[in-house]
Amino acid sequence: MHYCPGCTHGIVHRLVAEVIDELGIEGSTIGIAPVGCSVMAYNYFNCDMIEAAHGRAPAVATGVKRADPTKVVFTYQGDGDLASIGMAETVHAAARNENITVIFINNAIYGMTGGQMAPTSLPGQVTQTSPYGRDVKLCGYPIRVCELLSELDGAEYLERVTVNSVPHIRAAKKAIRKAFENQIAGRGFSLVEVLSSCPTNWGMTPEKALAWIDEKMIPYYPLGVYKDRSAKEAENHG
Amino acid sequence: MADKVLMKGNEAIAEAALIAGCRHYFGYPITPQTEIAAYMAKRMPKIGGTFLQAESEIAAINMVYGVASAGYRVMTSSSSPGISLKGEGLSYLAGADLPALVVNVQRGGPGLGGIQPSQSDYFQATRGGGHGDYHMIVLAPASVQEMAELTVKGFELADQYRMTAMILADGTMGQMMEPVALDFDVAPMPEKPWATTGTGMKRPHNIVNSLSLVPEELEQLNFARYEKYRKIEENEPRYESYLMEDAEICIAAFGIAARVAKNAVGEARREGIKAGLIRPITLWPFPKAPFREAADRVKAMISVELSMGQMIEDVKLASECRVPVTLCNRAGGMIPSPKQVLAAIRQAAGKEGDLL
């Protein structure tokens, strides 16, 4: 893999691949890689893969899924891809309750291009393009994707997880599995946001970067289920 | 002879697409092509196909990218400003060697421009439209019948060469009604072993991709693509030649401009001026041969266009500048009249004084 040492992409890739294996869907799954650090994710999954233009993965996934609804289609996107340049595609795929699975890596920075401010960079966060810290007066506030999408009637399932400890990784896998199971059951748009680390561009050791998720990211991006329509409906009927 | 039905050009495109086996359409409303979307919205659900109004032109072309990756016939349509938005997707389709049909029912520009007919996206269409070294096959209908025929042909060529085919029409072609026969023999879709249909655990995974970070490899990909383009330039140029056998003045015009020019050629002939018309049907590949050949015989060429003069560059290149090439044009949504074209013919023939 081409990822930097200590980066959590490897963990999330493994979780997605494990879920695909456990569900026995490798032969019928098509993955969509984005533009960003995971641009070459197509090399790391054995299922069929498509490399999309920056931010357009949900639109490409829509095309694939509409062409053959029997296939399992997932996108794997970073924060710049999903929440900045591709925000329209994200919101509308969710609004349509497009029956796809979205794995959203939120590491609060543009990794591939060398550490620029992301739509999810925290207030005050120092990046290459916010060298004095993210000034919210100048460039606004970070976007909480799960909270934002939870306002849409269309979205089926939205959960924020992280992978900075073993218990968190276990919980993340459960969420990813659910996001795939939802699609197989035809329930619709399921997105798992994974708070991830970027030691290289954060300028931290891998260990410190994992701690930074606990200290800085989780307080701004609380973990949890933001929407689970089917569970809620079952509850209401129970 | 097949029964003919009276149809709008835009509707003829939509119906022909269905006949060609296209079951997936994505688009965004824009005048003057919205009839295509409306037709698809009505018909697709009845035949088990997909009509989806996308959130943007960008999303629409990327949905096309997805369906094309999955190996199905797919199309989108738009008009000039919307095609600019699709430019990114057109480049990616080219880079990933995906077949698709894109329709541009042109309107006047630049910017938001107007909604009246235009041919001012000629450069954009024939030079690719997005970034990078690539071409699309560009087909220019001049009747409602051709709107339908070239749509079918476009799907076939796109599949045959694994690239985008574009129908470059204009607002007039889209809106006008003419009788059209829809009895097409559609070539069966070729096998697409490269498509991302799921491995079925029976083959190595397919990857649809336009990324290639090793320059030596990316160069080879470009070389291979241009070798394909060279074959297309050899095999696929299409044009109509009208009264060119003894012509001294050669008009070059496509689409609605060619219909106006045809009238003017007739008028000129009645006045004793030997005018003729070469009407490119493929704008890329541009039919160079008839112009090269005509350059040996005619006195002058006139490019008649609904733009500030774009195809004229290809006419000059094809005729190797061996005869003077002048422009007879209107722009911004205006259409040249037969009278204006006739005046240009008279001038080229050196007869404007005594005939006007």
Image (cartoon, rainbow, N blue to C red):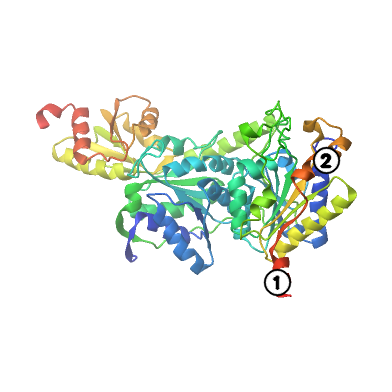
Discs 2, 1: same chain: yes
Which of these two is toward me, B295 or A77?
A77
Q: What label does residue A167 carry, if any?
A: none
Judging from the image, mark 2 belongs to the subunit labelled A
Name the residue at 58% across, 38% down: B225
Residue B267 lies, with reference to residue B198, above or below; the image says: above
Q: What label does residue A215 carry, if any?
A: 2
Characterize the local packing of mark 2: few (<14), some (14-19) or many (20 or more) Cα atoms within 10 angstroms: few
Q: Amino acid at mark 1?
A: Asn
Q: Quadrant of residue B344?
A: top left
Residue B199: horizontal and vertical position, in percent?
73, 56
Residue B133: horizontal and vertical position, in percent?
55, 33
> Gap between marks 2 and 1, in whole Å?
36 Å
Q: Quadrant of residue A220?
A: top right
Q: Residue furthest bottom?
A: A238
Q: Residue furthest left?
A: B354
Viewport quadrant of the N terminus of chain A: top right
- Of callouts 2 and 1, the N-terminal one: 2
Characterize the local packing of mark 1: few (<14), some (14-19) or many (20 or more) Cα atoms within 10 angstroms: few
Count up the numbered dots: 2
Q: Quadrant of residue B282?
A: top left
Q: Which residue is mark 1?
A: A236
Which of these two is toward me, A115 or A215?
A215
Q: Is residue B273 left or right of residue B106?
A: left
Residue A224: horizontal and vertical position, in percent?
77, 54
Which of these two is toward me, B181 or A148?
A148
Can residue A135 be seen by looking at this rendering? yes
